[in-house]
Image (cartoon, grey):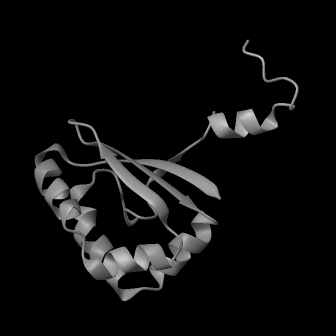
Amino acid sequence: MQRVCFQLQVKPERIEEYKARHAAVWPDMLRALAGTGWRNYSLFLRPDGLLIGYLETPSLEDAQRGMAATEVNARWQAEMAEFFVELGDARPDTGFVQLEEVFHLEDQLAALEPDSSETR
């Protein structure tokens, strides 16, 4: 499973409306995300508008391609684009900055040899 973390910047004057929209995401959008491989998907928003997203998926490319093929995603992205700064011609679901994962506890624990369970 691929772990994906990304960031976008919500316009400060649009933060409250952005939060309200995400408190009531369209049911067909929710089903489309689930059906195209978006798992454990969360968004986190700082008071200044910094948005951090996290999801797990077998393939981010496949998940994005699957969503791009849905009509509901085209409508949702068109409505959401106005909330963000510095997207240019990109849509929010493809114009985000993906962050590099530099540590994952479970991966490092799994890599330990069975006899090296001592605390360092």
Vertical relation: 30 (above or below) 39 = below
What residue is rendered at 63% in x and 66% in y? Answer: 59
What residue is rendered at 26% in x and 37% in y? Answer: 46
Place of residue 36 in the rendered image (x, y in percent of width and height, measured from the top left): 51, 77
Can I make out residue 57 in this image? yes
Vertical relation: 48 (above or below) 43 = above
What residue is rendered at 71% in x and 40% in y? Answer: 107
Residues 41 and 49: in front is: 41
**Direction from residue 32 to residue 22 in the image, left or right:** left
Q: Disc count in the image?
A: 0
**Direction from residue 104 to residue 13 in the image, left or right:** left
**Direction from residue 96 to residue 28 in the image, left or right:** left
Residues 1 and 102: in front is: 1
Place of residue 24 in the rendered image (x, y in percent of width and height, measured from the top left): 19, 67
Q: Quadrant of the N terminus?
A: bottom right
Place of residue 85 in the rendered image (x, y in percent of width and height, measured from the top left): 28, 51
Can I make out residue 104 in this image? no
Q: Quadrant of the C terminus?
A: top right
Given the current orientation, which residue lies at the most extreme top position? 120
Residues 22 and 65: in front is: 22
Place of residue 49 in the rendered image (x, y in percent of width and height, measured from the top left): 24, 42
> Where, by quadrant of the figure, is residue 72 drawn?
bottom left
